Amino acid sequence: MKSILYNDKKIFFAESGKGKTIVLLHGFTETSKIWDSFRDQLSESFRVIVIDLAGHGKSESLEPVHSMELQADVVYEVLKQRKVKKCLMIGHSMGGYVTLAFTSKYPEMLKGLCLFHSHPFPDSPEDRKNRNRTIKVVEQDKFGFVVRFITSLFPEGSRRKFGKEIKILVKHAKEIPKEGIIAALEGMKIRKNQSALLKSINVPVLFILGLKDSKAPLDRLWKMISLPQRSECLILRNVGHMGYIEAPEETLRMIKGFARKVFKK
């Protein structure tokens, strides 16, 4: 991986392929490694950039609170230094929140975006209380939290099937410093409601959703997919929060098709 300096801290990224640029952003307690398979296949037709968001993977923590806007600025700096003018941005979970913040701040750089098991809604008061409780848990037992959290991202009936993948995710997550996990929780806790943004943007939006996703408010997702002027949606019936693992062929095929349409215009 390569790195840039942002406020004197190292931010790591990897780049492969040639052509139009696709940017892949990982979620909470994940690293850019989640995209290894997608990057390999997408880079056959596109230039692909994956980034370790601040406080995750190899990238250093920047502040006690990593707001989605701060993470968006980090992504922008990577893309600016790599001379990216336009891109399709795909964000999984927290990466989707960062994608929306990026869309708000740098709309001229986007040809389209994908919310991959993500949504535009802010934390409710109860959600914020849960974030605070989670922060205390992480402070006391980071490893135990990581194991429980990552396991919960998969539907109960499929956890044994994806046991190997869960172990790999846990292995990478336990290497994330405690301060990076807490800074992300603090940042997600204060994120903005981006519903109006989704309604106003004029670039196409792809939604990838799992009907068994315990981390997404399904009752509001139906409203979400009708917000953009132009949108496509892949709804996965037996998938939880980790479609890139649970349904890799379907999700990758959808992303490839969406990217071709986005860059054709």
Image (spheres, rainbow, N blue to C red):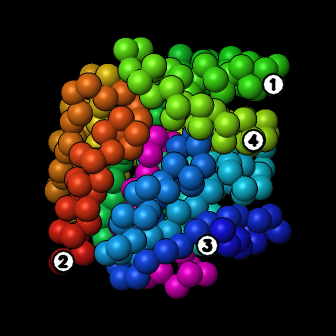
Question: Residue 225 in magenta?
Answer: no
Residue 170 is left or right of residue 223, and the answer is right
Q: Residue at x 66, y 27 (%)?
A: 146
Q: Mark 2 points at which residue?
A: 264
User: Marks 4 and 2: CB-CB under 8 Å?
Assistant: no
Numbered mark located on residue 14 in the image: none
Q: Is residue 136 above or below residue 75?
A: above
Q: In this view, does 71 lie above or below 84?
A: above
Q: How crowded is mark 2: few (under 14 residues within 10 Å), some or many (20 or more)?
A: few
Q: Mark 4 points at which residue?
A: 175
Question: Residue 83 in magenta?
Answer: yes
Q: Name the residue under label 1.
A: 139
Quadrant where the C terminus sits is bottom left
User: CA separation, marks 4 and 3?
Assistant: 25 Å
User: CA separation, marks 3 and 1?
Assistant: 30 Å
Of discs 2 and 3, which sits in the foreground? 2
Of discs 4 and 2, which sits in the foreground? 4
Q: What stretch is highlighted in magenta?
A: 79-94
Q: In which quarter of the image is residue 247?
A: top left
Question: What's the residue type where badge 3 is placed?
Answer: Glu
Question: What's the residue type where badge 1 is placed?
Answer: Glu
Question: What's the residue type where badge 2 is placed?
Answer: Lys
Q: Which residue is drawn at 72% across and 57% down?
A: 59
Of discs 1 and 4, which sits in the foreground? 4
The disc, 1 or 4, on the residue closer to the chain's N-terminal end is 1
